[in-house]
Amino acid sequence: MSRGAPRPWRDCDPKPAWGKFDDHTGQFHPLEHHCADVAACFEALLRDPVLRHRFEDAAGEAGFSRLTEARLTALAFLHDFGKLNTGFQFDILKDHPNAPKKVFHIKAALLACRRNGRLLDALGILDLATWGVEGLEEFLRAALAHHGRPAVALHAAPGPDNIWRPFEGYDPVARAKLLAERSRRWFPQAFEGGPELPFPPALVHLFAGVLTIADQLGSNREFFPYEPDSDAVYIDRARCRARRAVRETGFRRAGWADGAVGADFRTHADFKAVFGFDVPKALQEEVAKAPLDHPLLILESETGSGKTEAAVIRFAKLWRAGRVDGLYFALPTRAAAVQLHERIHSALDRLFPKQAALETVLAIPGYFKVGEARGERLGRFEVEWRDDPDERQRRARWSAESARKFLSATAAVGTIDQALLAGLKVKWAHFRGASLARSLLVVDEVHASDGYMTEILRALLRDHLAVGGHALLMSATLGSVARDALVRNGSYRRTGMALDKAAKVPYPALTLARRDETHTIEAFHPTGYSKRVAMTAQPIMGDSAQIAALALAEAERGGRVLVILNTVNQAQAVFAAVRRQGGERLCLQVEGGPAVHHSRFAVEDRKLLDRAVERTLGKGSVMGSRIVIGTQTLEQSLDIDADLLISDLCPLDILLQRIGRIHRHEDTARPDRFDQAQCVVLEPEEGLERGLSGGLLRHGLGMSTRGGGIYRDLRVLELTRRLIGQHPEWAIPDMNRDLVEEATHPECLRALEEELGTIWEEQSRETIGQMAAEQKVAKAHLLERNKEFDEADFPPLDEHVRTRLGEDGPRLRLSDRVVGPFGRLVGTFNLPAHLFRGGGVGMPTTAEIEKARLESTSGELMLRVGTRTFRYDRSGITRSDA
């Protein structure tokens, strides 16, 4: 049936208000039915004890009563009243003459609130003044944000006056009266007398997020089939369907703890049942004993010490106690998330009772993986799962089918970016934040990141903890300044330490924090596995031929050599040099040929690269000569084990992360030459002073005049360089605390400035100023849930609000997929913005992105985006004019 002739709605007399419409069949769902579906889902979501506790915490001293719940449910019912406007209703009749112009229903609702008292009176909103005018206005604004962003910017937007007038048998005011009547009939408790609505900001923001979830569920036709005939008792069916929708999409989890294996971790048998090892490590037992009334834990311990299992233990304890009903495990890189996903899924599969049918989601856009099952995007909204699941199992994968839903999964493993998006003024932030509120947020490999990222993470933690959420931060290399910044949220008190005291803080350590006390540090015994790393420095940074020769020489002696460079360009250059010098067979092998590992590949090929690295250096991999070249994608959270590391100079905490990828497993057999772990750090031949004027930016060191750069604080880099010279052997983890403090503590930084003189002091001021500027930018981008909802206006183009400054470029989804350099079909690329700088071209337009294509030219694959052309081969994407 054509869109111009929707017979079922056209033939109604008088015409109802439709809420959902199928323009292929002409079937429709009355507005009052759709509103009932959404309100019933909101109601059902609040039946989850954990989420209800979040509402109680968000309400604070005012409390969250059954009356407040009923009133919010009634307001949820009215979320779509803007669809009553005549222009919206007649938009389905494209060929109808003289029909009012369509007005987007959110804008129409705002216009009605601003200047249409007759419609508001018909809806019964004016009668709700007894609920408290201020609170009513706040929650109405939040209800109108259910499409993913606040609509306050539309307040002043003009609109036609005829959209609320009767037209061709349709009367919006009459339909508004029907909504009001249904609201009073279906939610009678909301209209009982009582105190005014409490409206602390945290509660309003949480309401907005949960209502958005309810709207997503209530719009799912699988659960809510269209019923065109208005029914005064429809709410009974809506509630039954809502309970099923909430249950089958995984939101209803109460009771799952019954029958769980090892959820208490009181005995060694519990640890063995979930993880398979007989005796837990000291830090795992310490985390198992940690009190649950401390919502923030920071776990500092060396790489490979069992922090991942400790996070699962913390989740299990909180979950068993009814404090959380979900887990989001955030990692710094995509490769780390891909590798860790299987471990987390395996542990949780043994932990949860079989009736839970839990499948851990891999929360990386484009991957479509839950548990062991893989899927493929068919259309804009559909995913085909290769294991041919039954309908119930497929619906349980709802959260895996869209990036905005990742945080709503019972358990998900993904990148930190997905969590940080809940704290920024970007579309679906409230949806993400409300989903995350129910879960334990685990952030792995936290360190002293740039000012922008740190500010966002701090704000996200503050708001997450403020509504009763729980978080666990883990790191092998956290300095006292960074730890203090993360603990100091809201009413958490600052505990700044002098260098001598900071260096004496136990390591490993567990920090516990809650509002009513300063954090405490509990020490426990190290894992018992330590390594001594021979540290040497060579002034060949940027000399790809010499770096390649060094890597080849060590690999030919039987070693597995890991080469981590600061930039993609340098990784590609060293990869090319190794190939020129005859080392192709020793390189990382992917689909029968050599490859380098970094982020600048098609999404489809990145999956192949991740699996190849794990096969080559992962646990149980075959010993033998190999060279794996990559960038920061290889440095954190990965369970890979090389014999020798060649690394560009980088900040000390990052260098320790990289060192964590060599001699990771104590029982690994190695060639005699590599009995001891070895790390070669590549330094610039000319020293670091050139970086003060931007001369080392191509190596990723220093800061440009625009504030760009990877590792910008040259003071930390200089201290790191000196520590390599002062200590030719590093004992890991015994020296971790001292090394990090000596390279990052403010006292050490100030002493270096005084020694090196004015030019370094100036660089320090510029670096600190740039970090302050980034923090200021971050604060402007933050969605601060401790402020009123009408202050949460989002920018119109939120792609500029980023989790990582300078990295976001266009995401390409090619209309025609092409066979890529590894023999697989490819069609999705995430390109960094800097590839489009220079030459007066700039970022591509939306039209150019949509027309992007990958084609073979003279035997080479060329990616064309607007006027830019990129080469694509086994080294990844490179600019053809580079």
Image (cartoon, helix red, strand yellow):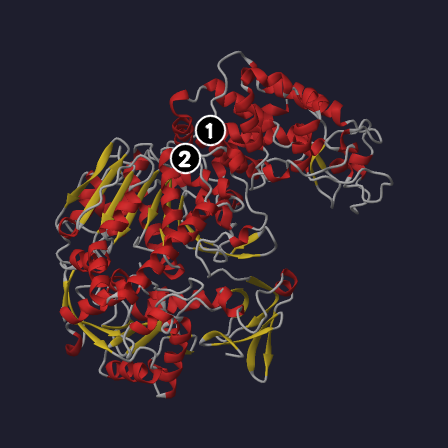
Q: Position of residue 484 (x, y in %)?
A: 26, 45
Tag 1: Cα neighbours inside 10 Å, few (<14), some, or many (≥20)?
A: some
Nearer the N terminus, badge 1 or badge 2? 1
Q: CA distance from mark 1 to mark 2?
A: 12 Å
Q: Residue at x 36, y 60 (%)?
A: 766
- Tag 1, which secondary structure? loop
Q: Residue at x 53, y 72 (%)?
A: 838
Q: Is the Cβ of the residue at disc 1 closer than 8 Å to that at disc 2?
A: no
Direction from residue 99 to residue 531 in the image, left or right: left
Tag 2: Cα neighbours inside 10 Å, few (<14), some, or many (≥20)?
A: many
Residue at far bottom of view = 581
Q: Residue at x 50, y 34 (%)?
A: 210
Give the label on residue 630, or none.
none
Q: Quadrant of residue 88?
A: top right
> As shown in the figure, which amino acid type bears the numbered disc 2?
Arg
What residue is disc 2 on?
Answer: 253
What residue is disc 1 on?
Answer: 46
Q: Quadrant of residue 669?
A: bottom left
> As shown in the figure, which amino acid type bears the numbered disc 1?
Leu
Residue 341 seen anywhere in this rendered image of the structure: yes
